[in-house]
Amino acid sequence: MFRFLGSGAVTQVISRRPTSLGVARCVHSIPFATAEVEEISGSQPAEVQNLVGGKWGRSSDVNTLLDPLNGEPFIKVHEVNKSEIHPFVESLSKCPKHGLHNPFKSPERYLLLGDVTARAAHMLSLPKVSDFFTRLIQRVAPKSYKQAEGEVYVTRKFLENFCGDQVRFLARSFGVPGNHLGQQSHGFRWPYGPVVIITPFNFPLEIPVLQLMGALYMGNKPLLKVDSKVSIVMEQMLRLLHTCGLPIEDVDFINSDGPTMNKLLLEANPSMTLFTGSSRVAEKLAVDLKGRIKLEDAGFDWKILGPDVQEEDYVAWVCDQDAYACSGQKCSAQSILFMHENWSKSSLLSKLKELAERRKLEDLTVGPVLTLTTEAMLEHASKLLKISGSKLLFGGETLENHSIPSIYGAIKPTAIYIPLEEILKDENYDLVTKEIFGPFQVITDYKKDQLPMVLDALERMHAHLTAAVVSNDPIFLQEVIGNTVNGTTYAGLRARTTGAPQNHW
Amino acid sequence: MFRFLGSGAVTQVISRRPTSLGVARCVHSIPFATAEVEEISGSQPAEVQNLVGGKWGRSSDVNTLLDPLNGEPFIKVHEVNKSEIHPFVESLSKCPKHGLHNPFKSPERYLLLGDVTARAAHMLSLPKVSDFFTRLIQRVAPKSYKQAEGEVYVTRKFLENFCGDQVRFLARSFGVPGNHLGQQSHGFRWPYGPVVIITPFNFPLEIPVLQLMGALYMGNKPLLKVDSKVSIVMEQMLRLLHTCGLPIEDVDFINSDGPTMNKLLLEANPSMTLFTGSSRVAEKLAVDLKGRIKLEDAGFDWKILGPDVQEEDYVAWVCDQDAYACSGQKCSAQSILFMHENWSKSSLLSKLKELAERRKLEDLTVGPVLTLTTEAMLEHASKLLKISGSKLLFGGETLENHSIPSIYGAIKPTAIYIPLEEILKDENYDLVTKEIFGPFQVITDYKKDQLPMVLDALERMHAHLTAAVVSNDPIFLQEVIGNTVNGTTYAGLRARTTGAPQNHW
Amino acid sequence: MFRFLGSGAVTQVISRRPTSLGVARCVHSIPFATAEVEEISGSQPAEVQNLVGGKWGRSSDVNTLLDPLNGEPFIKVHEVNKSEIHPFVESLSKCPKHGLHNPFKSPERYLLLGDVTARAAHMLSLPKVSDFFTRLIQRVAPKSYKQAEGEVYVTRKFLENFCGDQVRFLARSFGVPGNHLGQQSHGFRWPYGPVVIITPFNFPLEIPVLQLMGALYMGNKPLLKVDSKVSIVMEQMLRLLHTCGLPIEDVDFINSDGPTMNKLLLEANPSMTLFTGSSRVAEKLAVDLKGRIKLEDAGFDWKILGPDVQEEDYVAWVCDQDAYACSGQKCSAQSILFMHENWSKSSLLSKLKELAERRKLEDLTVGPVLTLTTEAMLEHASKLLKISGSKLLFGGETLENHSIPSIYGAIKPTAIYIPLEEILKDENYDLVTKEIFGPFQVITDYKKDQLPMVLDALERMHAHLTAAVVSNDPIFLQEVIGNTVNGTTYAGLRARTTGAPQNHW
Amino acid sequence: MFRFLGSGAVTQVISRRPTSLGVARCVHSIPFATAEVEEISGSQPAEVQNLVGGKWGRSSDVNTLLDPLNGEPFIKVHEVNKSEIHPFVESLSKCPKHGLHNPFKSPERYLLLGDVTARAAHMLSLPKVSDFFTRLIQRVAPKSYKQAEGEVYVTRKFLENFCGDQVRFLARSFGVPGNHLGQQSHGFRWPYGPVVIITPFNFPLEIPVLQLMGALYMGNKPLLKVDSKVSIVMEQMLRLLHTCGLPIEDVDFINSDGPTMNKLLLEANPSMTLFTGSSRVAEKLAVDLKGRIKLEDAGFDWKILGPDVQEEDYVAWVCDQDAYACSGQKCSAQSILFMHENWSKSSLLSKLKELAERRKLEDLTVGPVLTLTTEAMLEHASKLLKISGSKLLFGGETLENHSIPSIYGAIKPTAIYIPLEEILKDENYDLVTKEIFGPFQVITDYKKDQLPMVLDALERMHAHLTAAVVSNDPIFLQEVIGNTVNGTTYAGLRARTTGAPQNHW
């Protein structure tokens, strides 16, 4: 049974952990937090609740998560089951299709949200709060402190961009004189009304905050579902937003398994669903929701090194970051690298190997892979290594001395060389271009006159998210950019496939 | 079998009708036309071909259309069957995903298309050419000369908007300074590459030209399919565009039935499909194409008359136009009218009746309905008339003295009054708000304090295309606009639901 | 002699007032402030320094200001004289014409300024800091607490709008495809380089901050000069900005008399000068600087009340605010009011009188006029009262029981009625439309058929800053708006002439 | 005395040249033209009239122009004298400050002007009309057929850009939600009302058409004054525009000397004056008009060749075009060329010499200089040649076998080398960077480590119109672009200083 818990319930949560939390609040000055990030453990498991209609609450089912670093059961997520979805459906349906606000309705809410955002940005700029979220991200989606901190930083910068009047500027309309006196055409941005946002595990704070706030700004009422493995981060972030003045009824928050969410979507029939995650689920949803969905794809992201070899150390460092930061669990991670033969002759490959081998579990520069097991990844590697001419450049082994539970993956940063001609063969192409959401990349090289083959390989790919063309040669850049398609292409000698979205406008 | 016909084939077409066409060219100075608009008839049927890979051609199957005004078999449309689709699939697949041009590839094509557009706009401004297309539209989608001419005019205005450099201005990009010296982020508009455009019968020239040119401008290669009933108009328009310099390989043009087109879509797997037409087909396509589709919906369009009664003659005239022009076969046609009680007491209804009864078949101010039979429409009327309190205001009968073939509909402009309370009842709502794509509307009224009921009725509708709020009262306008959602809302005393899209930017 | 004072000098400043400042810092927690707002007085005068080349310093001349409320000498402004301008000229000339940054130079400065802005916005949101600046404004430019606080609020909102990446978004460029492969046209925003900003007394914080930050964001190096009567406010604000991370060399700050500033401008020859202030000085500068100047004008601002009389209390309240808030010392203050005869018959005038008479010196709802003496204003009133048919509606007298020094003005809120026909006469027009920068307005009325005469009166005015058309009648609004010209026109029943600029984008 | 001549007057003009013009109209099909371009000569002089208040007319003074190629008196320009300016002042003053139209007044005029523009663009695309204007430009501002035709082409492209709805799209407004329900802020573009446009001799069609149409589109009423030497071109173009539907009262057109025009400006006091021409006149106007003027400057335009030597033939060709096309009489003509030492060692200079020497009077690839005499230019050359280390590269002589009248200049394309160190010396700098509006350039070179000296030279220049950085080296480009300022900078190996403005948006 799903029980709605009012403010009394929150008190109850607190009273359950009087010591730790009481102290936490003194020590940490984090008034909104209900979790003590350093103390979450098998003996002191944290708890993630749901929010609907302005009330936080538990459900009858609990999904207990294992600590990805040591396998202890460390977080209890209250997951709503199929018999408990009604309140969520009802809450969504209360929001009309013209939204909570629009340019002709409750415009003061644009200002309210600008104020909430300014306060939230300031909160995230406080070292204690920034550290709290950085560590919380590390606990559930292990990555280096710098990578996790970067996620908090980008989230803060996004919020800074929508302080003050910037929310209402989003609702800027335009007008054009009409044919006759007294006639003008105006164009306005209108909300969808009730919407659903579904986000994945790899960026537990950044992706949901950006999508949630964007939806709120335009007047929508979002129901947010984050992958249960990491949903504690957004649960805490919602509490921060409430502290900053966000009306508690504005956002609903749900934890559930996939079939339950699917049922909820069919019953609530939201005006729009924004889904970020695997292509397989995306396609099913597109069918179920009859097209009323926006998808943020995954990607098999490529990088091409052009003929001009310069700044080898820098390029090697960027390649290592693009392929292996966050253990390769970014949608923008470098999946395949095409080197011009001039680079093959350079020290690049040996530098890549050296950098990859420096990564270690202790500082989480390499860590657990949350969606693939060790076996699955090694099996993929061994399939690739059967291709004629292929060879293991480095990695290809399980991590040493780890206590990562077996449901997760644990391999060393891996690179496999495959000849370009083999990649292009029909029998190999799909295998080689299969995205492995872990510390794994394919490397190949091409001769001066083989650029058309490289472009052909790129044209045949499906998911085009990011790409990088590493060269300062304007003719080469133009040739590659003009003949490819991607969400984002980074060009220039310092190009990379991964970059913060906050300066893509 | 589908036979490709080269330029020899065009000669062949000409040689088949040496006299009429030869003369036509002298008389009409319409060098591109292969049809003689006034002479198309059972004895001199016109012919519509397909275009693929730069070659016009016939197919083994022919769909013979009946003249909607007298039932004569007057146009032979060569429809491609399932065994003949290969050339179309191949032609589409030749276009890479980065398109025929983009900001980094063949930018001179932006200028070429600007030139083609300038010439085409000028051609459409020539009285002979304008008359040719106006009459051709009338022959296949009967509407008054003024309405058909308006379609040609709007098409011309659209083309005028993209003369000269305006096509390349569409490809305007932006840049933002990056974090470090030498770094900048740029955003570009990129084409989809191979695309399919499917358009309906009611605007045979305007809808396909606007969508086709937009797709071309951005670098896409479109395959165009227009409803066979009216595809002769675009077949002739493509010939005009070729005369104006459009490369003949840039657009493919196909006639076929639905299952064949569905097969083609699945095989060619275009990057995007733009579909304008019925919701039923749209939903099936959304599923088949896994979301890679943009839909232009139909609409059940409403108009509200506010408390301030002014300019009754003008408002009555607009209501008549919105509901019955083009025999109600516009997606933006007024389907339901909500009158404030002040208007009920005015002479509006009697004026509406008078105007509706002036419409006659001779000048096509009322004419055949191409997607619904007479029986279907009268049956819907009789169902509505069973609702408690409803009454027939005018119409509700078949047209007199007509020779419209029975596959089409032929009724007098019809209006049925239904009390607001009844409309809102669950058992009636779906019936009342069913879109009838013909000269048919529902009229109701509301009391001063019943506005929330009206807004509730609007909130429950599904397809929101256009709407009009007829009032000069700013408080009333704000109340209605802020609480509804539509593609386009026309506001003010002179508001209407139908309007040329060329000034919505 | 102008003495440069390094960090030692600042210490010296501090050491001169060890007690007050030391305590102040403890009590107020305003770490940047060097003045104690409540204690500035004849016995504890404050001091305003100059800033050049990153160093605060004093000059040989001191301009001692009288407290506008009691005549005590309460602030000592170090004014640079002609022999001391060299360091300012040199500092400006060090900045090249391509600025401190531009999209191709030091782009990291865009981010730096975004950060500085975020911090400054947060500082201004702290109650202590907000109160500090509110009170400081009140001390030098007496207005009510609410009006002064509003100025701080608007300044904060402006800063919130440029947090995070918003500064670099200002530097957004665009590109258009060129004629040939490899060609693209790009448009960038470039700074002027060395610029001068000169601002008036009436908004001591808002006007300089908005103009200064805008100049900095785009890469300019500004020299700021604020009217000495109020420059203490910006002197303190600069110290706040330095605390927030603004590099101390980025802005120079000067106090001087007019001839010295004129000499400096001619020697430094800045790329652009932004001047806000009196038309007389503006014209001289335009000539001296050969057009390299942008002017923010004063204005004789009008309001028209339309035929529809509604919400009399609200309209009266807005009229009172527009005419008399800040003692009429806003460039956007209502200078003339045209009432439709329907309003003349209403209780509006009596309500205006009542509201004006409630204003009192104690809470600064009326206060000293800083640029006109009492005599000058009363003389103007008596000239107006000689016009045939004119009459004093209220005011027209000196304030009672005040200690405002005689260099400033002190009159009661005043309104004089003049018949429309008289206003339009050539011999009266210039006199009636002379702007009085104090609590002073002209009121007239017009008959239904006299609107063209009103429009003619408006057409003949020179400075068009703001205007208001108070009506909900769309025909009336269109008629007036379409036939007039203004920087900002406020329309609608709730229209006003004064409004915060932060939502005009 | 200035006599107004109505349509009768035009008949009179025609009756004066019954044969030629009658034939011309048959032959040329140029219905609007009143001049026969090939037959204008000493024996058949053409006549240029004035237009005011919708009527063409003559004046009492006539300025007789000499044919720049042979000195024959070939055009009689009716120049208005000081006693005849009243009708022009009156016509301007009839236009209110809110213009002939604005978004709230006569919006149908946006469409009218879109239609006029579409027709005019089409007219200019007719070979006969294009040839007419090309030749007319050649007659009065001698340049090669290709250069003059380019001017007509750019003018046509500009007009194509404002066909259809594009004029009203210029008047696009925006809106932002306000603080409270019912409040929105809107921004509109408003005209100035009465404006004056003054244009120079070098682009007799392009500059006035672009500025005139831009002014008209926004609702202004322009008075146009073109340099009398070339005003026949715009006189004919206005007649074309009238044929295309431009209301004859919309534009006034005046020929006069400078003092008369100055008097007119002071009396008419237009809201804005747009002046393109010499800096000397511009500064005087800025003072007289108290800043109400927009200036299009002249320019001393530079080009830098970077370290990467490629495509020498192409670069040499562009340099020759930039410096000598139109005999150097473009504001964007290359005035100084900085070569990297790598280029000095290449064959560039010898190629430049060869190309310059190919230019000849017969095809007008070099021709008369309209604002400087031969003596003035040769004297400047000899002054430059006195600088230490300077040398004549080519040219420096009068043209041979010419009949150009002595009031105009006639020299061979000239280049003078001056060492960089000498250019930078205070005693030489002003002399070297003096703009010579003729076929004249300075060339210098710089060593790898002398780039800062080059940048210093650029920083010290005053008029920054166009510039080119010829290199494909991204670091070099960034260094130069980030450290300079210009209206337009062209970058890349194919960069040039002269380019059509129609793709700068």
Image (tube, coloured by chain):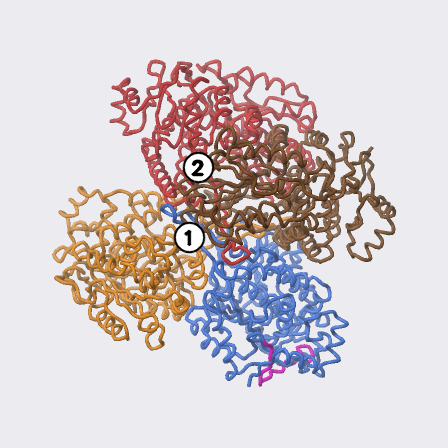
Chain colours: A brown, B red, C blue, D orange
Most common SS among magenta residues: strand
**Image position, residue A465 (x, y; %):** 55, 41
Q: Is residue C61 magenta?
A: yes
Could you tell whether C223 is left or right of D37 in the image? right
User: Magenta stretch?
Assistant: C55-70
User: What is the distance, in whole Å, between disc 2 and disc 1 at their CAs?
Assistant: 56 Å
**Image position, residue B290 (x, y; %):** 57, 29
Disc 1 marks which residue? D219
Q: Are marks 2 and 1 on the same chain?
A: no
Residue D241 vertical position relative to residue A485 in the rendered view, above or below: below
Q: Chain of mark 1?
A: D
Q: Find residue A160 and report its image quarter.
A: bottom right
Q: Find residue D1 and report its image quarter.
A: bottom left
**Image position, residue B439 (x, y; %):** 52, 24
Residue drawn at x 72%, y 54% as measured from the top left: A131
**Image position, residue D264 (x, y; %):** 34, 66
SS category of the residue bearing label 2: helix
Q: Can residue B475 be seen at all in this image of the molecule? A: no
Residue drawn at x 70%, y 81% as measured from the top left: C15
Disc 2 marks which residue? A453
Question: Which of the numbered marks, if any, corresponds to residue C293?
Answer: none
Disc 2 packing (10 Å; few <14; some 14–19; many ≥20):
some
SS category of the residue bearing label 1: loop
Q: Are marks 2 and 1 in contact (CB under 8 Å)?
A: no
Q: Amino acid at mark 2?
A: Met
Q: Amino acid at mark 1?
A: Gly
Q: Chain of mark 2?
A: A
